[in-house]
Image (tube, helix red, strand yellow):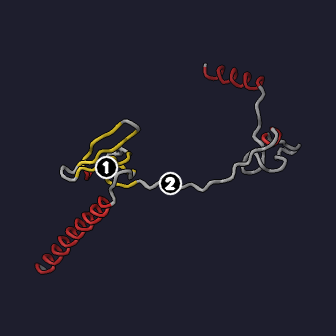
Amino acid sequence: MTILLFAMLGVFIFMMFRRNKKTQQQQAQLQSKFAPGVEVMTSFGLFGRIVEIDEDENKVLLELSPGNTATVHRQAVTKIVEPVVAAEEPTVVPNDASSLTAETTADGTVAGGTAGTADNTAPRVETPEETMRRLNDEGKKDS
């Protein structure tokens, strides 16, 4: 029983040291990619661009916005921000305003099926008179 307890303790200690070593390797790999001009994020959520790295004092000068800089410890920089490349979709511009409005048929469906809700029914538009009546009725209910 004692041997089993020591074996489990040994495995636990081994796993703890292995995790620490792996974390240190990841941190070293990340810091090797640091260079001026790289977009980064700090551990406390600041985003910026590396301007200068001071190897002697383990400091990094970040430009947060044009003209605003901050000096942080090198280990506070935890992530390199990769620029997001969005797929560009062609913008379709209609040549007249008629294509921007939905035409409804007598049964309430949208002609052409391009506007409205998911079931191809156009949302009902309230007239100004109906809006005033509804708001007045709601005010009467509250009091």
Given residues 33 and 26, the one toward you in this image is 33
Q: At x 83% / y 50%, what residue is drawn?
A: 112
Category of crowding for the residue at label 2, using alpha-carbon neighbours closer than 10 angstroms: few (below 14), some (14–19), many (at least 20): few
- Mark 1 closeness class: few <14, some 14–19, many ≥20 residues within 10 Å: few
The residue tagged with tag 1: helix, strand or loop? loop
Query: To which residue does mark 1 refer?
Result: 43
Q: Image quadrant for the C terminus?
A: top right
Q: Amino acid at mark 1?
A: Ser
- Tally the marks: 2
Residue 24: quadrant of the picture: bottom left
Label disc, if present, on residue 27 of the rendered structure: none
Q: Which label sits on residue 84? A: 2
> In the current view of this chain or complex, which residue is farthest to the left?
2
Q: Is residue 88 above or below residue 95?
A: below
Mark 1 or mark 2: name the one nearer the start of the chain.
1
Q: Is residue 114 left or right of residue 52?
A: right
61 or 72, which is in the foreground? Answer: 61
Q: CA distance from mark 1 to mark 2?
A: 20 Å
Q: Viewed as shown, does residue 80 lie left or right of 99?
A: left
Relative side of 129 to 105, left or right: left
**Residue 58: x and y, percent?**
21, 51
Q: Quadrant of residue 94?
A: top right
Q: Quadrant of the N terminus?
A: bottom left
Front-lying residue, 77 or 51: 51
Does residue 9 lie above or below 67 as drawn? below
Three-letter amino acid code of the residue under disc 2: Val
Above or below — where is 35 with respect to 4?
above
Q: Nearer the viewer, residue 18 or 69?
A: 69
On screen, residue 103 above or below 90: above
**Rendered residue at 19%/73% (across/down):** 14
Tag 1–tag 2 contact (CB < 8 Å): no
